[in-house]
């Protein structure tokens, strides 16, 4: 043991001063290390004065990192000192071993720092499972408390800061994340996304020169009021995303051009018209039964039978015989379920028939389209009409037309990156619709500005795009760019962007899922800034 003890001191306490190991006891599960502090003096935690007057001593049992699969407990004898400063309210105090203990601590500092690292990486439940694997069992609440007790990291005022929102509860509560774009490290989390909160934070840091943001009005207002000296830069990804949304609306508006309707032969049209002009059902058992009853009743009446006699022979009420006798044709009896009653959907049936022939067979999508046109009712009536009247209609012969989203993707993709099949389909669509061909040209010119950082050409592009009356969504997009022209021009000119901020927003989503319902703002902020 005399040979092992110096090696154990060097192994366990090499980074500590004034710690002497007296003995080591090894059992099946625990390694007990008896040690004592050999410091001559200690510092009072209140007044900071050094004292060498010993009042007494006692044992502390902090848990240390496990070794060889066994938990390590340090039986550390520490002393209480008498404070020599007469004005100090504390008469005695217990000494602390730097790097080993802290006040009221039940773990050594290295075990504590290890658990903190596990908690920052894995949060509560997963962290507790991992700690139990390497022999330091701890509850998930303890890990979260250790994270919450950590101090904020020191941060310097950044020169380029990125701003974006993150969701604490999607659709209800949002906060703001701020990132140093140059170091790509998070600086702070704000509890909301209000302009006043952001302006107050920026006003405390006058050294900020550039603010990277999206085009949200509250961020623009907060950056303008809080950092008037800073240059605001609109993020290029958000600009391209907004252009994609406008382009998809333009393509959807011209969806009829995605595939031309095939011309039906004249003979088929002439044959279809008489069939469509007869609203009465044929081949239906109730319709055939009504026709048979009408023929039988009129035959008996023509043979000289009275209406009461016909009623007794057929087992029908007199009122039913009277109604059949008054009807000259059986079609007059097709009332109620056979009669086409006026509904709110009648005005939209031609549009539904047209969209069905264009290839749209999704009842929910059809309902959303007529809902935008002012249809006041719910989805059920459209679903019933589609299943009853449209399901049996033949689809146009030929390949299914591409969706508006697919065509938008083709337009937004670089021509060299498109597969040959997509290039052929896009070429056919653009040849069939001059408006979509013009849209593709506007998209490509904007992409050239964005990738080559040619922001000086933006006013010319906006003027041309705003003059297009056939593409209203693109017109609105150009008008919105004018409201934030300086930031958009800077975004298309300078190399700065908010890519690092978007990465941290995705990371925040992951951290929230790890902590489930316990991811409050304070705890989430600690993990984002320290992990």
Image: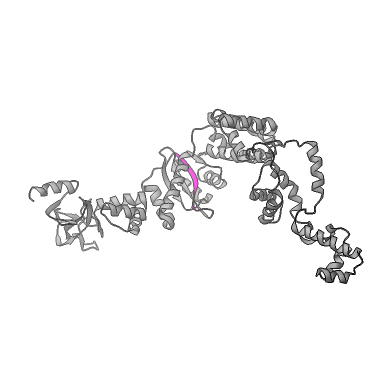
Residue ID at (44%, 39%): 181
Q: What stretch is highlighted in magenta?
A: 159-170
| Count of numbered badges drawn on the protein | 0
- Residue 475 locus on image (x, y percent): 67, 38
* Residue 329 in magenta stretch: no
462 or 388: nearer the viewer: 388
Q: In this view, does 312 lie to the left or right of 175?
A: right
Q: Is residue 474 rendered to the left or right of residue 100?
A: right
Whether residue 124 is visible here, answered yes or no, is no
Write the residue at 30% across / 57% down.
138
Q: What colour scheme has been applied to the protein in the rendered image?
A: one colour
Q: Is residue 38 visible?
A: yes
In x, y percent, where is residue 401?
65, 38
Q: Residue at x 79, y 43 (%)?
A: 272
Image quarter of residue 515: bottom left
- Magenta span main SS: strand
Position above or below: 325 against 431:
below
Which residue is pictured at 85% across the width and 65% down the height?
323
Residue 105 in the image: state x and y as whole percent. 26, 58
Q: Is residue 170 left or right of residue 71?
A: right
Residue 424, horizontal then vertical, whole percent = 61, 29
Residue nearer the viewer, 121 or 423: 423
In the rendered view, tell whether residue 433 sits above or below residue 287: above
């Amino acid at each position: 043991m005399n040979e092992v003890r110096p090696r154990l001191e060097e192994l366990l306490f090499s980074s500590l001063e004034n710690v002497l190991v007296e003995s080591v006891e090894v059992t099946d599960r625990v390694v007990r290390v008896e040690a004592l502090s050999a410091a001559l003096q200690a510092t009072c935690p209140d007044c900071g004065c050094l004292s060498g007057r010993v009042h007494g001593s006692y044992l502390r049992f902090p848990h240390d990192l496990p070794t060889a699969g066994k938990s390590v407990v340090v039986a550390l004898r520490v002393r209480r000192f008498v404070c020599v400063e007469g004005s100090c309210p504390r008469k005695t105090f217990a000494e602390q071993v730097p790097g080993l203990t802290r006040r009221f601590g039940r773990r050594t500092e290295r075990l504590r720092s290890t658990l903190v690292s596990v908690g920052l990486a894995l949060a509560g439940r997963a962290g507790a499972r991992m700690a139990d694997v390497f022999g330091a069992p701890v509850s998930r609440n303890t890990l979260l408390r250790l994270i919450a007790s950590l101090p904020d990291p020191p941060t310097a005022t950044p020169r380029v800061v990125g701003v974006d929102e993150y969701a604490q509860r999607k659709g209800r509560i949002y906060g703001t994340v701020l990132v140093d774009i140059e170091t790509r490290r998070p600086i702070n989390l704000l509890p909301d996304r209000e302009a006043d909160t952001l302006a107050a934070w920026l006003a405390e840091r006058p050294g900020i020169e550039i603010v990277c943001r999206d085009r949200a009005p509250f961020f623009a207002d907060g950056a303008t009021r809080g950092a008037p000296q800073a240059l605001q830069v609109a993020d290029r990804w958000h600009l391209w995303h907004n252009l994609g949304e406008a382009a998809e609306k333009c393509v959807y508006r011209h969806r009829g051009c995605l595939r031309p309707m095939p011309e039906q032969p004249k003979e088929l049209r002439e044959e279809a018209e008489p069939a469509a002009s007869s609203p009465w059902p044929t081949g239906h058992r109730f319709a055939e039964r009504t026709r048979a009853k009408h023929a039988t009743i009129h035959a008996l009446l023509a043979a000289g039978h009275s209406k009461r006699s016909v009623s007794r022979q057929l087992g029908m009420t007199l009122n039913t015989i009277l109604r059949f006798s008054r009807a000259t044709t059986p079609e007059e009896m097709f009332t109620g379920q056979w009669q086409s009653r006026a509904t709110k959907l009648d005005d939209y049936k031609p549009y539904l028939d047209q969209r069905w022939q264009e290839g749209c067979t999704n009842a929910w999508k059809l309902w959303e389209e007529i809902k935008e046109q002012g249809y006041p009712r719910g989805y059920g009536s459209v679903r019933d009409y589609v299943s009853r009247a449209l399901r049996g209609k033949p689809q146009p012969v030929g390949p299914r037309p591409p969706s508006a989203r697919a065509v938008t993707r083709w337009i937004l993709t670089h021509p060299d990156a498109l597969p040959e099949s997509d290039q052929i389909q896009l070429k056919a669509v653009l040849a069939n619709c001059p408006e979509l061909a013009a849209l593709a040209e506007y998209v490509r010119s904007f992409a050239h500005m964005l990738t080559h950082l040619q922001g000086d050409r933006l006013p010319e592009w906006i003027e041309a795009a705003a003059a297009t009356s056939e593409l209203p969504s693109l017109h609105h997009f150009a008008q919105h760019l004018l409201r934030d022209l300086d930031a958009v021009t800077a975004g298309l000119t300078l190399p700065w962007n908010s890519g690092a901020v978007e990465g941290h927003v995705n990371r925040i989503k992951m951290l929230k899922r790890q902590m489930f319902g316990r991811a409050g703002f304070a705890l989430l902020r600690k993990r984002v800034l320290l992990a």
